[in-house]
Amino acid sequence: MSTPEAKSTTKIFVAGHRGMVGSAIVRHLLSKGYTNIITRTRAELDLTDQRAVQTFFESEKPQQVYLAAAKVGGIHANNVYRAEFLYENLMMEANIIHAAWAHGVNKLLFLGSSCIYPKLAPQPLAEDALLTGPLEPTNEPYAIAKIAGIKLCEAYRHQYGANFISAMPTNLYGPGDNYDLETSHVLPALLRKIHTAKVHGHPSVPIWGTGAPKREFLHVDDLAEACVHLMVTYNGGEWVNVGTGEDLSIKSLAELICDIVGYTGELNWDTSKPDGTPRKLMNVDRINALGWKARIALREGIERVYSEIKETFA
Ligand code: GFB
């Protein structure tokens, strides 16, 4: 465990600190007494620019890196902006991982995604399911970029002995989420749509797909705690799933949100929209054995988020 002295002296770079994940990691680090955290906005440092990233690492010399910078989005954004999802994610992770090695970073945590696993992999998804079958087509470019990030960490560890580790979170939600209905993930989209329908007295809410796919949702504050736990205690070469180990159908999620919001209208399924992967429940045995478990129950987490955003959307 880190000593109080190490917490104030260890220089930590959180890449992507304005995103939902990066901002949660910064909050958690601060709450645990880490004070030497460095961040850069996109305007200050373009992480897709190799030279700029090299110069930043050369001058700042961080000792630890949380690689939470990524271009992310829901099923529609992944499917439409395929080139951006592949190119930007590959560039950011390659630049950061290489510069971290070249400038002597002691430890780096790379964040991937549950969509790295094959579309029809056995459930729950164990870490060794990687690269055993074809990916879900709607998010193949993003998944390929994230698999490349895992493999970069693995290769830099293997060839150079770099202590670079990887965590694979399940679907996330929490403060700072994206509520744009075109590009967001399902949970914030449903929260916004159902809240708006209630406020305006709409008789029904349009929801994409059939409602049959199952998803697992982790509050980002739980993820942040898991990331810091892994950074402090884990030095293994195997990537580690981070989830709750429980999932529910999109239909059940919609019904739960209706209940939280107090909406009693109809759910109107738009089956012209894709369902995506039928199920992606994480096997969380490895991270549980490493001494971490999710704490925030789904209903409680959604209630928290809803209380934070309900004044924003009408
Ligand atoms: O969160 P989401 O967009 O992405 O969830 P994935 C998609 C599921 O929710 C599909 C249904 O079954 C959709 O049909 N859905 C219902 C909706 N209504 C809506 C809605 O209004 N908006 C959205 N977005 N979905 C993403 C991947 O997959 O998950 C990424 O594309 C990444 O690569 C991320 O891994 C965590 O869970 O399908």
Image: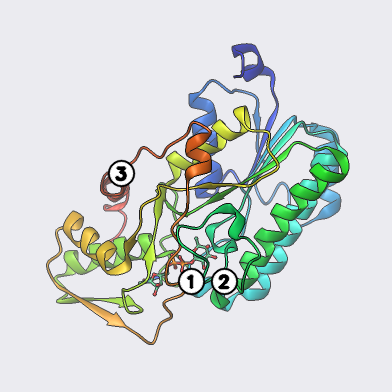
Residue, disc 3:
297
Q: Residue at x 25, y 64 (%)?
A: 252
Check contact, mark 2 vs mark 1: CB within 8 A: yes
Give the class, few, some or many, for how many residues have Cα within 10 Å of label 1's Cα (few <14, many ≥20).
many
Q: Is residue 47 visible?
A: no
- The foreground one among 256 and 293 is 293
Residue 80: x %, y % from top left: 56, 78
Q: In the visual, does 68 lie left or right of 98?
A: left
Q: Residue at x 69, y 23 (%)?
A: 10
SS of the residue under disc 1: helix
Give the class, few, some or many, for how many residues have Cα within 10 Å of label 3's Cα (few <14, many ≥20).
few
Distance (Cα) linking label 2 and label 3: 27 Å
Distance (Cα) linking label 2 and label 1: 7 Å
- The foreground one among 188 and 134 is 134
Q: Is residue 182 visible?
A: yes
Residue 196: x %, y % from top left: 24, 66
Q: Residue at x 54, y 29 (%)?
A: 29
Q: Amino acid at mark 3?
A: Ala
Residue, disc 2:
139
Q: In the visual, does 174 lie left or right of 230?
A: left
Residue, disc 1:
75
SS of the residue under disc 3: loop
Q: Amino acid at mark 2?
A: Asn
Ligand 1 has an atom within 8 Å of the beta carbon of the residue at disc 1: yes
Check contact, mark 3 vs mark 1: CB within 8 A: no
Q: Residue at x 50, y 48 (%)?
A: 20
Residue 256 position (above or below residue 279): above
Residue 158: x %, y % from top left: 82, 44
Question: First in sequence: mark 2 or mark 3?
Answer: 2
Check contact, mark 2 vs mark 3: CB within 8 A: no
Ligand 1 has an atom within 8 Å of the beta carbon of the residue at disc 2: yes
SS of the residue under disc 2: helix
